[in-house]
Amino acid sequence: MEREKTNLTDEQLAMLVQKGDKEKFGQLIDRYDQKLTRYCKKFFFNEHNIEDMVQEVFLKAYQNILSFHTDQKFSSWIYRIAHNSFVNALRKKLRNPLYFFDFDSFISHPVYEDQTKNEIDRKEMREILDKGLKRLKPSYREILILFYVEDLEYKEIGDILHIPMGTVGIRLSRAKAQLKKVLPTNARSHYE
Amino acid sequence: MNNHQSQPSGAKQSILEKIRKGDVKMRPKAYFILKIILVVFVSVCILVVSSLLMSFIMFSIGVSGKLFLLGFGWRGIVTFFALFPWGFSVIDVLLLFLFEWMLKQFRFAYHRPLIYMFLGSILLSFLAGFVINGFGVQDALLQQNDEHPIPVIGSLYEHVRMPSEKKDVFQGVVSSINGNVFTIQANDYDHDADDGIRKVVAPPDDQIGSSLKVGDKVFVAGDEQNGTIYAYGIKQIGPHDGDGS
């Protein structure tokens, strides 16, 4: 029975929660707590109470669970809730209308996949990211985290950030270029 | 993708405890359905207002005669763009941006660059405006306003027929003709002292100037010097053009 429970997909668990099985939500927390905590830490650099932020995400997810359609990916859905929560928290802190108008999602861009597909390259990239993430603006920081740290595909990132796939590619490319500029000199040689 | 590692249970238990106690409840399905209905309703309203505004813009440039400027060469084109109702157009564009923002939460909207949807909504608004004008809605509103001023929007219709004499654009009825010089009884629809006879000198190569008859309604673009208009463009307009009737 225990084995059967853990073999359920996220979407199947969400469906059971929707039907009233509150305890199944605990399994979803188990699966996403570490990921969302990591995402939050990278986004805020420990400047916020990470545990409270992540708790808030899960509580919002539970509140809105009936809006989740099981033909969607649960991971994209919960990351979207996390993204909205983090952006709102950042807006309150900075008192800036972040992401108000995104010119990149207004115009068309061709979709070209990032070439860092090799696992070693990605691992190196993750190490480099920590050295420069803090100096990047939130939109660039976030896309690097979602692609290199959370290991998500363009399509999923598009669903989380509500932007076209072409914009994911162009923003990722710009984020990498910006990261290269802000990296300390000794780290740049690794990046190149 | 499914992470089966066990996590520190403190936070998890705190969340589950809040759920069990009822401190956090699931929002009912009806909430999300109503939210979608509201978004769709507001979006449709925005599109309707945008279409009405677009129809008014098209109507106003027709009924004031500004559209004729496009046939008066390069100078006419420049004057047309100077007189174009940019204020209303900017409001219309902002409405369409709002329309896009309302729909951005849906996958069909954010999956493609917004420019496509934006251009599509402009086209839709334009076509709807065209259809509205085709049914004579704006003509009827103009006539209605002449008889009984319409609250709020009445002032828009009051000024819509006025030619822009400050930009050297005039409207009137031909009262006499002498070669390439004719006079018009100018009417800027403001019922004041500057309504009166104006002398117009047609351009030497202008065909229309020589085909005019007394009683014709005309639209004239030109420089006014000492009460005489030296025209660079003349358009004869029938009884159903230029006054909305």
Image: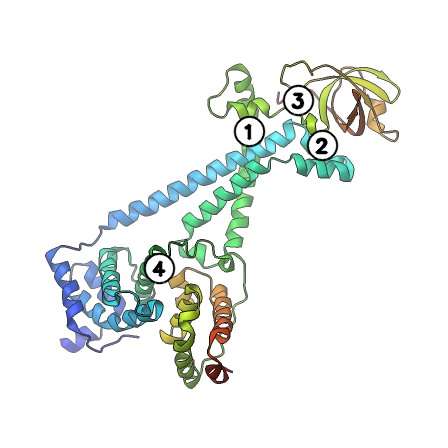
Spatial CA distance of label 3 from label 2 is 15 Å
Residue position for label 3: B240
Do the dots labelled 4 and 3 sit on one chain?
A: no
Circle 2 SS class:
helix
Residue at x-position 43% and y-position 64%: A139
Residue at x-position 14% and y-position 67%: B13
Residue at x-position 45% and y-position 59%: B111
Of the two numbered discs 3 and 1 on the same chain, state the one appearing first in sequence.
1
Do the dots labelled 1 and 2 sit on one chain?
A: yes
Spatial CA distance of label 2 from label 4 is 53 Å
State the image coordinates of residue A154 (x, y, percent, origin top left): 43, 69
Q: Are marks 4 and 3 in contact (CB under 8 Å)?
A: no
Q: Are marks 2 and 4 in contact (CB under 8 Å)?
A: no
Residue position for label 4: A90
Mark 2, residues whose alpha carbon is within 10 Å: few (<14), some, or many (≥20)?
many
Of the two numbered discs 3 and 2 on the same chain, state the one appearing first in sequence.
2
Spatial CA distance of label 3 from label 1 is 15 Å
Closer mark to the observer between disc 4 and disc 1: 4
- Give the left or right position of residue A53, taking residue A191 as reference: left
**Tag 3: amino acid:** His
State the image coordinates of residue A93 (x, y, percent, origin top left): 34, 57
Circle 4 SS class:
helix
Of the two numbered discs 1 and 2 on the same chain, state the one appearing first in sequence.
2
Closer mark to the observer between disc 1 and disc 2: 2
Q: Are marks 3 and 2 in contact (CB under 8 Å)?
A: no
Which of the numbered marks, if any, corresponds to residue B68?
A: 2
State the image coordinates of residue A28 (x, y, percent, origin top left): 22, 68
Disc 1: host chain: B
Residue closest to the eye, A154 or A2: A154
Spatial CA distance of label 1 from label 2 is 22 Å
